[in-house]
Image: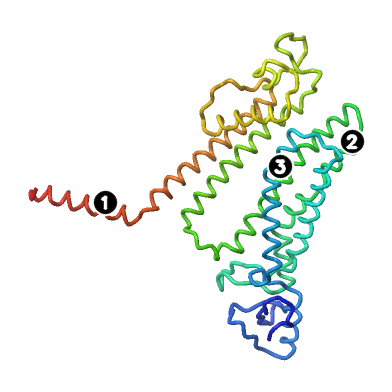
Amino acid sequence: MSAPNSGRAAVPYDAQPEPEFETAPESDGHPHGSKHHKKRADFVTRHLIDSSHFAPVQYWDLWITFLLCFTAIYTPYEVAFVKTKMDAIFFWNRCVDLCFLADMTLQFFLIVREDDPRYGTRWVRDPVKIRNLYLRSWFIIDFLSVLPFDVLALTMGEGARAAKLARLLRVLRLLKLVRVLRASRVFQRYRTRLSVAYAKLELVKFVVVILACVHWMACVWGMLLSFVDKDKVCDPRDPVEGCQPTWFSESMGSSTKAPDIGEYTASLHWAVMTLTSIGYGDISPQNNLEYTVGVVLMVIGASTWAYILGSACRIVASLDENGIEYRQTMDKINYMIKDSGLS
């Protein structure tokens, strides 16, 4: 039975006794069963969306992917180097939050894939089950990503306590990065349509992971400067008793706050050295917090670099399987000729 002509593809539905809306493993697109179950199938069809055939959802996914890229690039930079204020970026971020909130609502009505131990991979078309699956999996992550921590930061007053709360909110704003996990969910929907070799996709993914890791490490390293009061930062040219040194004041030779791009460039320089294990030593931690965060970032960076190098070498070696097999065969023939004394 087909849905009314509303631009959506007809969604086949097969009813089972338990649970009431559970779909059968078949996906031949021809409903069967009692008249009562057919009516329920029509109801389900009208209230669910098949993203693989519904064009507006596909355009929406492209828009969400763009917003995810914006979040992955700008949000950590904003948290680390940009002071929250009522400007155009602030209102743009609120629009982004509304888009992600709308996407959360959409997830309750999208047909999803499920790996069933009895029937294998199948499409779930039961509305109740779809919503339960979303609530048990991605809902918490999506909910945390739309919390308006930067709005709360604007309500902070003056004083030491307000400064501590502002620093805490600055860290919590990094939770917006969990939005990036949505990219894997969008990719899962369309990966079967990509006519690109798996090895090439993996290599592209490794490049993206390296760039993202370097950018995020640089932003975290630069954010440490905001945890030290500006009037207490040591000036190497005129040190004062009780002042607090930072990596930026020591490496740049001045406690004067440089433009944001200057701090980011220095942080990016440190992140690339740390990730690739070069370690020039021109930028080094100067206080307990910087040492602690530096150790954590070095462990993360080294693990990421080792994993990507190992995986990339394995994939590159398997790109020319026919050539590898040919060379191995020729080596065997040469060994046989040598052992047989035919040469």
Q: Earlier in the sequence, mark 1 or mark 3?
A: 3
Label 1 to label 2: alpha-carbon separation: 68 Å
Which residue is disc 3 drawn over?
74
Tell me if 314 is positioned left or right of 29 in this view.
Answer: left
Q: Residues within 10 Å of mark 1 (few under 14, many from 20)?
A: few
Q: Which mark is residue 327?
A: 1
- Amino acid type of the residue that numbered disc 3 sits on in the rendered structure: Tyr
Q: Nearer the viewer, residue 20 or 175?
A: 175
Tell me if 12 is positioned left or right of 340 in this view.
Answer: right
- Amino acid type of the residue that numbered disc 1 sits on in the rendered structure: Arg
Tell me if 77 is positioned left or right of 328 in this view.
Answer: right
In which image quadrant can residue 130 be found?
Answer: bottom right
- Amino acid type of the residue that numbered disc 2 sits on in the rendered structure: Met
Q: Nearer the viewer, residue 134 or 319?
A: 319
Q: Is residue 123 above or below residue 136?
A: below
Which residue is disc 2 drawn over?
156
Judging from the image, what secondary structure is the residue with disc 1 in?
helix
Judging from the image, what secondary structure is the residue with disc 3 in?
helix
On the image, the x and y values in percent for residue 291 come to 65, 25
Q: How many discs appear? A: 3
Judging from the image, what secondary structure is the residue with disc 2 in?
loop
Q: Which mark is residue 206?
A: none
Label 2 to label 3: alpha-carbon separation: 23 Å
